[in-house]
Image (cartoon, helix red, strand yellow):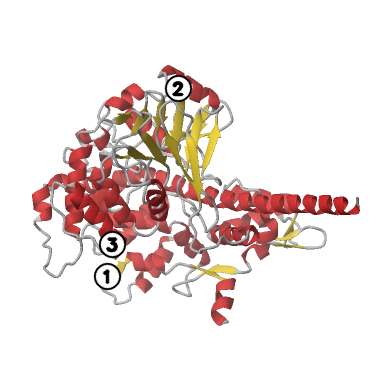
């Protein structure tokens, strides 16, 4: 009897221990996801700045009439034909990688796959040839690929897929073939090593269906990406798209739009004369206004209408939720959240039975919701950190229930114990959260001090949590995370300055004010995109005149309260050789976060 009680005690303890580990893992994933979505929201909000820039920048810097063309015009691929590109690149006799003949044969494909296994590099000339061959094929494909299964033909569906996951799937499930078709549902190579190699294999192998998604890899691929199909319909019953749907999703319209005119989620359509110009730029993505005097070299005809663009944004960026209805996707800043009623309405309207989508990391690699009508599949294991999540893919066969295959790619031959994996995931998540906090240090301190009326340097847990959410807007369980972020006294009150005790942003110039440094660090990704756009010769150098003009616009549009002279002084100090220009990418790299733990490890 005593041994039975002991066994029950041990069992209950272990269940509680496992539950606590799972809760910590869940909180860590929530941090990763909240920050990822906030960054995506910032990317979409850049489109509003481009609108503002086009209305103002041309008046300040009229000597650059090509700016609008670089933002909204055709890509380089439209200006040059295949021969003009390829003829510029010679393959030297010393090249010992795979040599391909076009059009490709199965022998060429075998040569390419084997070469990549041997870590050989494909010459740039052949990469370009593959891209042009791919574009030629994609241009003849419909917006939605209609495929059928049969007892002898299965279809494998992969969600977000990094290179290591793709290699594992091919090894365990076989390469695409006539009887082994694949659907890669967007974001197929946006992270991990060997991304271009995987992309080349996906492009050259038949029966490998690729679909549109929201991210670019290299500028040279942009034109090819615009021709990727929007989605797939399997057996006239299953809709496969990257994101989701909204209450206004119109599959008939999406079947007929000119998808190649969808250049980027950052570049919404330019309203033509007669279209509505009154949309609030600060509250709705997709309202871009260009003044009448700006010339766009005819590129206006090469864009989707605003309604078409929003339809595509919805299916690329939307996420399912348990709540009924359709409401804005505030986490991402684009698309919507759709409930089970919206799923039923859209599927019934088009005589469909199921929606398979990707776009969200799931701990187990897949998730089923909306009464089994919506399936999320996510194929990139360890997406945020080693051990953070499993990957999965789906296999479909004629008249059969979908089968799920899960896996976890690991660098070690033996998986680490759960507590070690959770410790690593949690540590990494807290690290990036603290970097988010230090980028808003001045704002957070101001919010803390407003709550601290007695000037004690301490706040209650509720006051601290309210201030954190009010400034950072990440919708995180701050009370549960507080033990990782701050110190408390014996009464449970929080010493709010301890939020920043083990982290700071390195100053490239000691005299620079903290507010300026935090702002530049917080907006460094946005600024890099903007300055790369106006860097017409791709030199990486920005003149002081361009720097000042763009900063004034950025400062005005984002309502940043920093004196211009502070930025001017910092830029002049960063102009090391005093030639009137700065290497802007190096300028941004000068702002980085230093963790106290890093210093201790370095010292040891």
The answer to whether residue 63 of the structure is visible from this angle is no
Q: Residue at x 11, y 62 (%)?
A: 90
- Looking at the picture, tell me which residue is in the foreground, 568 or 49: 49
Residue 298 got which mark? Answer: none
Q: Judge depth for marks 3 and 2 and give the one in front.
A: 2
The residue where tag 1 is placed is 580
Upstream in the sequence, badge 2 or badge 1? 2
- Looking at the picture, tell me which residue is in the foreground, 196 or 212: 196
- Per the model, the C-alpha gap separating discs 2 and 1 is 60 Å
Tell me whether the residue at label 3 lies in contact with that at label 2, contact meaning CB atoms closer than 8 angstroms: no
The residue where tag 3 is placed is 545
Q: Would residue 242 appear left or right of 405 to someone viewing this image?
A: left
The answer to whether residue 347 of the structure is visible from this angle is yes
Local packing at callout 3 (Cα closer than 10 Å; few below 14, some 14-19, many 20+) is few
- Per the model, the C-alpha gap separating discs 3 and 2 is 55 Å
Q: Which corner quadrant of the image does residue 538 belong to?
A: bottom left
Residue 578, placed above or below residue 274: below
Q: Would residue 7 appear left or right of 291 to someone viewing this image?
A: right
Residue 463, placed above or below residue 241: below
Upstream in the sequence, badge 3 or badge 2? 2
Q: Which corner quadrant of the image does residue 348 belong to?
A: top left
């Amino acid at each position: 009897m005593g041994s039975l009680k002991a066994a029950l005690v041990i069992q209950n303890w272990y269940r509680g221990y496992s539950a606590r580990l799972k809760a910590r893992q869940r909180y860590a994933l929530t941090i990763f996801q909240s920050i990822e979505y906030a960054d995506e929201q910032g990317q979409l909000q850049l489109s509003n700045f481009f609108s503002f820039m086009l209305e103002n920048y041309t008046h300040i810097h009229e000597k650059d009439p090509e700016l609008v063309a670089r933002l909204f015009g055709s890509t380089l691929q439209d200006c040059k034909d295949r021969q003009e590109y390829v003829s510029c690149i010679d393959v030297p006799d010393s090249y010992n990688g795979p040599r391909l003949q076009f059009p490709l044969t199965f022998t060429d494909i075998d040569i390419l796959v084997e070469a990549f296994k041997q870590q050989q590099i494909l010459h740039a000339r052949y990469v370009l040839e593959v891209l042009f061959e791919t574009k030629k094929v994609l241009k003849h494909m419909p917006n939605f690929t209609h495929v059928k299964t049969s007892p002898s033909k299965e279809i494998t569906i992969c969600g977000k897929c990094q290179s290591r996951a793709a290699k594992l799937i091919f090894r365990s499930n076989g390469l695409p073939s006539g009887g082994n078709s694949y659907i890669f549902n967007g974001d197929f190579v946006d992270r991990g090593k060997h991304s271009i190699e995987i992309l080349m294999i996906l492009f050259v192998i038949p029966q490998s269906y690729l679909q549109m998604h929201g991210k670019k890899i290299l500028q040279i691929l942009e034109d090819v990406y615009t021709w990727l199909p929007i989605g797939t319909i399997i057996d006239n019953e299953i809709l496969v798209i990257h994101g989701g749907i909204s209450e206004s999703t119109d599959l008939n319209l999406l079947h007929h739009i000119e998808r190649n005119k969808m250049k980027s989620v950052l570049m919404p359509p330019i309203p033509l004369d007669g279209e509505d110009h009154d949309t609030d730029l600060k509250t709705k993505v997709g309202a871009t206004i260009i003044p009448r005097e700006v010339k766009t070299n005819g590129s206006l005809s090469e864009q989707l209408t605003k309604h078409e663009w929003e339809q595509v944004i919805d299916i690329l960026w939307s996420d399912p939720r348990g709540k009924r209805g359709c409401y804005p996707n505030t986490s991402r800043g684009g698309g919507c959240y759709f409930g089970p009623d919206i799923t039923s309405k859209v599927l019934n309207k088009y005589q469909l039975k199921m929606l398979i989508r990707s776009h969200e990391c799931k701990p187990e690699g897949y998730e089923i919701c909306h009464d089994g009508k919506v399936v999320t599949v996510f194929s990139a294991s360890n997406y945020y950190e080693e051990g953070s999540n499993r990957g999965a893919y789906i296999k479909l066969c004629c008249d059969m229930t979908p089968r799920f295959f899960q896996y976890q790619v690991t660098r070690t031959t033996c998986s680490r114990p759960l507590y070690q994996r959770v410790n690593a995931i949690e540590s990494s998540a807290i690290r990036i959260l603290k970097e988010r906090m230090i980028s808003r240090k001045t704002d957070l301190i101001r919010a803390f001090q407003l709550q601290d009326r007695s000037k004690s340097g301490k706040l209650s847990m509720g006051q601290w949590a309210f201030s954190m959410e009010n400034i950072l807007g990440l919708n995180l369980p701050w009370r549960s995370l507080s033990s990782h972020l701050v110190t408390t006294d014996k009464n449970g009150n929080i010493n709010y300055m301890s939020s920043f005790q083990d982290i700071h942003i390195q100053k490239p110039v000691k005299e620079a004010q903290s507010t300026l440094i935090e702002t530049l660090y917080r907006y460094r990704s946005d600024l890099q995109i903007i300055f790369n756009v106006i860097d017409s010769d791709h030199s990486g150098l920005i003149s002081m005149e361009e720097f000042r003009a763009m900063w004034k616009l950025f400062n005005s549009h984002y309502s940043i309260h920093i004196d211009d002279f502070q930025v001017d002084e910092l830029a002049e100090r960063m102009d090391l050789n005093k030639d009137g220009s700065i290497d802007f990418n190096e300028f941004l790299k000068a702002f980085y976060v230093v963790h106290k733990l890093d210093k201790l490890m370095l010292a040891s």
